[in-house]
């Protein structure tokens, strides 16, 4: 696929161009290293590999090449540089060069690249690319979401009750009390946790999960996925009922579902009252 052309309006990049950029970079930097790049633990306990760093360098260079006016905030950057990128007050790219690093290092084929353009304190454009399946998810605020060029529409799918739902649940970051409740008396039919947060959001948007729960995602984990789910018609909030996305560093919990019915039942079981925007 050819490199994206320089856009006429640098404040509103074409999501197809961004997806093409992510696809080309992932094929060059990630797939050749898949299962062959040992992970090293960072101070926060997460894992980083040479592939993360190579992909981040490439994406930062490409984004800056095509949209030089927009700074980049990426996961492996120094925290001071991350804060500086957010502190400009203008548009900023939020980038996770390799979401699902532990999977990637272990040879588990579930990982992705996530890019979100934040403008005016809101996510404007989002792209999540899965190089194993060659599957690209994208959204633009107010214009909808799509996967592989096909619209994502949660309302067009059946809405099973919570008791029949397949749930995506990350137990690792939940409180012991909540995790215990879910183990002892799960309200859903079945549960999965594949270990790449940005893809989890997209799988809710695509109807592969009916409901989703995560105890603490970083900005680069949820920025792109939250817009993709919202534009597909899904719903999300934190365990405190707040909007998940905010243009700030620090972990945010996630309660999400693809349909209003599932979201209502899921929130009721969890004891969450979503606040109005």
Image (cartoon, rainbow, N blue to C red):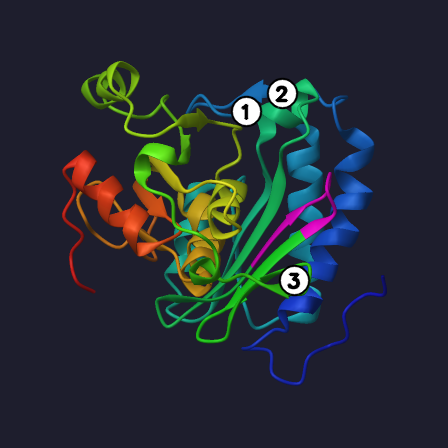
> Which segment is the magenta one?
127-135
Is residue 245 at all visible to an observer of this figure? no
Q: Nearer the viewer, residue 40 or 215?
A: 215
Direction from residue 116 to residue 169 in the image, left or right = left
Quarter of the rendering occupied by the N terminus: bottom right
Quarter of the rendering occupied by the C terminus: bottom left
Is residue 225 at all visible to an observer of this figure? yes
Of the numbered discs 1 and 2, the one sitting upstream in the chain is 2
The residue lying at 44 percent from left, 75 percent from top is 142
Q: What SS does tag 2 mark?
A: loop
- Residue most extreme to the bottom: 8
Q: Which residue is mark 2?
A: 39
Count of residue discs: 3
Q: Which residue is mark 1?
A: 47
The residue lying at 27 percent from left, 20 percent from top is 179
**Contact flag, marks 1 and 2 (Cβ < 8 Å):** yes
Of the numbered discs 3 and 2, the one sitting upstream in the chain is 2
Residue 276 sits in which quadrant?
bottom left
Q: Nearer the viewer, residue 212 or 45?
A: 212
Q: Is residue 217 above or below residue 63?
A: above
Q: Nearer the viewer, residue 28 or 151?
A: 151
């Amino acid at each position: 696929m050819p490199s994206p052309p320089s856009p006429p309006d640098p404040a509103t990049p074409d999501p197809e161009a961004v997806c093409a950029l992510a696809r080309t970079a992932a094929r060059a930097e990630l797939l050749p290293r898949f299962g062959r790049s040992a992970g090293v633990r960072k101070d926060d306990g997460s894992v980083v590999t040479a592939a993360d760093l190579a992909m981040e360098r490439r994406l930062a260079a490409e984004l800056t090449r095509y949209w030089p006016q927009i700074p980049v905030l990426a996961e492996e950057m120094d925290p001071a540089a991350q804060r500086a990128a957010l502190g400009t007050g203008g548009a900023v790219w939020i980038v996770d060069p390799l979401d699902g690093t532990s999977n990637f290092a272990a040879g588990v084929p579930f990982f992705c690249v996530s890019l979100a353009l934040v403008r005016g304190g809101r996510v404007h454009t989002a792209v999540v690319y899965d190089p194993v399946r060659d599957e690209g998810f994208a959204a633009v605020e107010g214009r909808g979401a799509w996967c592989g060029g096909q619209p994502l529409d949660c309302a067009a799918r059946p809405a099973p009750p919570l008791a029949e739902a397949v749930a995506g649940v990350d137990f690792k970051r939940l409180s012991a009390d909540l995790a215990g409740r879910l183990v002892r008396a799960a309200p859903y039919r079945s549960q999965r946790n594949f270990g790449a947060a940005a893809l989890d959001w997209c799988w809710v948007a695509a109807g592969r999960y009916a409901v989703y729960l995560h105890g603490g995602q970083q900005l680069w984990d949820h920025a792109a996925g939250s817009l993709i789910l919202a534009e597909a018609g899904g719903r999300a909030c934190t365990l405190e009922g707040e909007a998940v996305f905010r243009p700030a560093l620090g972990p945010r919990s996630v309660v999400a579902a693809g349909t209003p019915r599932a979201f209502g039942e899921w929130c009721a079981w969890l004891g969450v009252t979503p606040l109005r925007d």
